[in-house]
Amino acid sequence: MRKIKQSHKALLAGFVSICMVGCVGTGDQKGTGKSTSDIATQVDCYLKGAESAGMSGAVLLAKDGEIILRKGYGMADREQKKSVLLETGFDIGSVTKQFTAAAILKLEMEGKLSVNDPMNKYLDNFPSDKAKIMIHHLLTHTSGIRGGFGGDYNDLVTRDELVERVRRSDLLWEPGTKYRYSNAGFSMLGAIVEHVSGQSYEEYVVENLLKPAGVMKTGYLIPGWDKKYLAVGYRNDKRWGTPLDGEWLPDGPGWNLRTNGGFISTVDDMFLWIEALKGEKILSKEAKAKLFTPHVQRSDNSSYGYGWGIRETPRGTRLISHGGGTIAFNADYRWWIDEDIILIMFTNNNKLRAGSFTPKIAEIIFGTEGRGKE
């Protein structure tokens, strides 16, 4: 393939107009203006163009519980010439946070805690400035705890070591007064899950959330990943490796990453998880209301629930979403909940990330009215 001497941004912007030629159908689907087959054809055409420029990843698109596009693109391992398969596992980054939030709500359903409990009810000896931090504040990034206390892979702290770092740190502001994204805050939630449940975080999530949802290939170590099924991440076109090639503790990643990010999953598993959330097998109606309530306003005119971002679309419907970014991997997870359209995309090339493509895919689904607002 000849080299294209234009920026990635300009290249991505050109994909839609190029791909729409010869790819436009004539059907109609209420709520989208197009038939699902037309949408699938156009999205696939767009992503094939991206693939030709070096994008590699997996995508799943569904409407009303029916999958309309489910496909891998590009290479999972360039050196071994292995293509991305549907069973390929990707690091989903901060998309992991929704499982931590769901675990807290599951424990609340079991009567073992309340989101209104202070953090220091479960994590002892926090000084007076942190006594006002409630679990709710941790879930909504309003605790005042700073974003992080070390690197994901080069600072392998244990749970207790990270808790101690938070304990000794200064708060950025009074709990509950401002929003600021905090990975460390979500790691405190994971520590609470372990304290209350008596299990490791991963054990609790797998046994109480994932297995009941039929989700079998999501987690850190419990899925028993064979590396040949893991995507290799590429950073600036250099091989970074699989998520399991980085340094981890014997039972999983260090706590700068654990419970706030780093789960490995597939697009199929993440679809099954969303489908399970539609009913009450995993979480009750009341728990899901808390999960998806816009608890705190953010500066980009969106809100944050518990482990999910929430935005009103130009059609007056709700978009529930979250992204996840790591050194080489990227995930974008979008659920237009009122229209029941699900878009899941994972990539393993930091130059062409999932979040660069999903806004354009939203335009294909909903038209230009969604530009920058989907």
Image: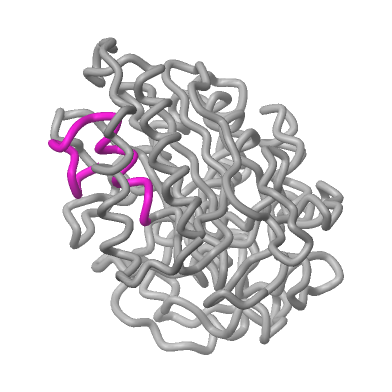
Write down the region rendered in magenta: 356-374
As for residue 363 lying within the magenta part, the answer is yes
Determine the residue positioned at 40% across, 40% down: 334
Determine the residue positioned at 35% across, 20% down: 38
Question: Looking at this view, is 113 or 37 the one in front?
Answer: 37
Relative image position of residue 149 (x, y in whole percent): 54, 84
Q: Is residue 1 above or below residue 245?
A: above
Dominant SS type (magenta): helix
Number of marks drawn: 0
Residue farthest toward the front in the current orientation of the protein: 2
Residue 26 lies in what quarter of the image? top left
Question: Looking at this view, is 82 or 65 the one in front?
Answer: 82
Determine the residue positioned at 50% across, 51% down: 51
The reply to whether residue 195 is in sight is no
Q: Is residue 130 left or right of residue 370?
A: right
Relative image position of residue 184 (x, y in whole percent): 52, 72
